[in-house]
């Protein structure tokens, strides 16, 4: 026999306590009767009450409680082999880690907003494989495609601006790295979600987007930041802003969201561009589009499925309680 929720079997330890409670009640009743006179005489005078039936009822209650606990533990008798298949698509998420992502024109910062967006998207996924890559002046596959969402979120948590050795925003290089992360044999079931402020596209992102389209990859771009521009803060070890980044001439560097390039990248691959919002409504829209795509078989597994038999134990407990109710504690006239 197999148990679905064996933790409830611990409640069987309460059954002896229930029996002891009934015994204690009986002893206490006898002591109370003795205060009024001879116990045997008083019990004979209580001609309408059947003490034998009372004992039977208590025994039935104890047995019924035992069967109820066994039913809660979900007894499973018999099993069959079942094949389960997991369907989904491959989703690669590319996150910009250049220093411009430290700008705070979107709270708490561009990079933190991007990480929140990615985490929310991962939470929505059901059966899809997800991968994460980071990019700045170059790109790196942080987490290859996986069905382990917890592992993906663990890699996501350690991402921070400036972690890439080369500064800049090489969007084209990031797209090419994402292409390598997908299965080459397929020409569909592939999505790339690109989160960036769009600045610094000197790696020919248009050419990379055309290459992605040939591989059947749909790119959804999310712009992080605002068009008006924002200085790049310099954060000290205590997490406080200690000035702003300046160029060689001593002028404060202003970073602006480049929506035009992100819109063009998405358009080439039949995807769509979204501007990051506080409500993260763009994620819901992207997920809805992904969810409507044709799925592929990602994994299959043969497992043993046990047959639930709790209803029999529940039925026995119900019958015993019905008998207990019918018996009563009165003698027949």
Image: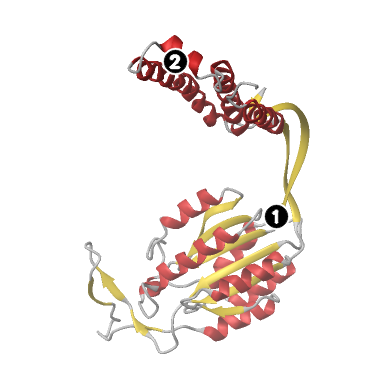
* x, y percent for residue 302: 74, 35
Lateral position of residue 108 relative to residue 125, left or right: left
Labelled disc at residue 183: 1
Q: Observer-nearest residue: 98 or 124?
A: 124
| Quarter of the figure with residue 34 | top left
Furthest residue in direction bottom, as rendered: 228
| Quarter of the figure with residue 184 | bottom right
Please tell me whether residue 250 is drawn above or below residue 166 in the rendered image. below
At mark 1, the secondary structure is loop
Q: Residue at x 29, y 75 (%)?
A: 233
Q: Residue at x 60, y 82 (%)?
A: 263
Lateral position of residue 291 relative to residue 203, left or right: right
Q: Residue at x 36, y 14 (%)?
A: 37
Please tell me whether residue 168 is drawn above or below residue 50 in the rendered image. below
Q: Observer-nearest residue: 171 or 305?
A: 305
* x, y percent for residue 301: 72, 39
The quarter of the rendered structure image containing the N terminus is top right
At mark 2, the secondary structure is helix
Q: Mark 2 highlights which residue?
A: 42
Q: Earlier in the sequence, mark 1 or mark 2?
A: 2
Query: Disc 1 vs disc 2: Cβ atoms closer than 8 Å?
Result: no
Circle 2 residues within 10 Å: few <14, some 14–19, many ≥20? few
Q: Residue at x 51, y 73 (%)?
A: 280
* x, y percent for residue 54: 55, 21
* x, y percent for residue 331: 61, 21
Please tell me whether residue 128 is drawn above or below residue 30 in the rendered image. below
Look at the image and tell me whether residue 260 can be seen. Answer: yes
The quarter of the rendered structure image containing the C terminus is top right
Look at the image and tell me whether residue 4 can be seen. Answer: no
Structural distance between the alpha carbons of marks 1 and 2: 89 Å
Q: Observer-nearest residue: 295 or 241?
A: 295
Q: How is the image coloured?
A: secondary structure
């Amino acid at each position: 026999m197999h148990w679905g929720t064996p933790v409830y079997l611990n409640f069987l330890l309460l059954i002896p306590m229930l029996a002891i409670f009934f015994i204690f009640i009986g002893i206490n009743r006898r002591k109370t009767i003795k205060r009024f006179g001879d116990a045997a005489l008083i019990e004979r005078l209580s001609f309408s009450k059947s003490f034998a039936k009372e004992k039977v009822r208590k025994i039935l209650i104890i047995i019924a409680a035992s069967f109820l606990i066994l039913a809660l533990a979900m007894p499973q008798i018999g099993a069959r082999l079942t094949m389960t298949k997991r369907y989904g698509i491959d989703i690669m998420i590319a996150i910009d880690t250049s220093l411009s992502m430290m700008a705070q024109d979107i709270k708490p910062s561009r990079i933190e907003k991007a990480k929140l967006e990615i985490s929310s998207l991962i939470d929505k996924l059901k059966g899809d494989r997800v991968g994460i890559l980071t990019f700045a002046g170059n790109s790196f596959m942080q987490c290859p495609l996986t069905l382990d969402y917890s592992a993906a979120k663990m890699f996501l948590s350690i991402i921070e601006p400036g972690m890439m050795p080369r500064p800049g925003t090489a969007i084209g290089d990031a797209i090419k790295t994402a292409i390598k992360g997908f299965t080459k044999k397929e020409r569909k079931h592939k999505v790339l979600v690109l989160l960036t402020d769009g600045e610094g596209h000197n790696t020919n992102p248009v050419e990379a987007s055309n290459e992605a389209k040939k591989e059947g990859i749909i790119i959804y771009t999310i712009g992080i930041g605002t068009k008006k521009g924002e200085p790049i803060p310099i954060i000290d070890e205590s997490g406080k802003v200690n000035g702003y980044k300046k160029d060689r001439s001593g002028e404060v560097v202003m970073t602006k969201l480049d929506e035009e390039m992100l819109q063009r990248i998405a358009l080439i691959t039949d995807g769509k561009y979204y501007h990051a919002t506080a409500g993260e409504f763009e994620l819901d829209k992207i997920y809805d589009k992904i969810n409507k795509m044709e799925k592929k078989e990602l994994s299959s597994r043969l497992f043993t499925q046990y047959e639930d038999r709790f209803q029999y134990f529940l039925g026995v407990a119900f019958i015993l309680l019905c008998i207990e109710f019918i018996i009563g504690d009165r003698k027949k006239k």
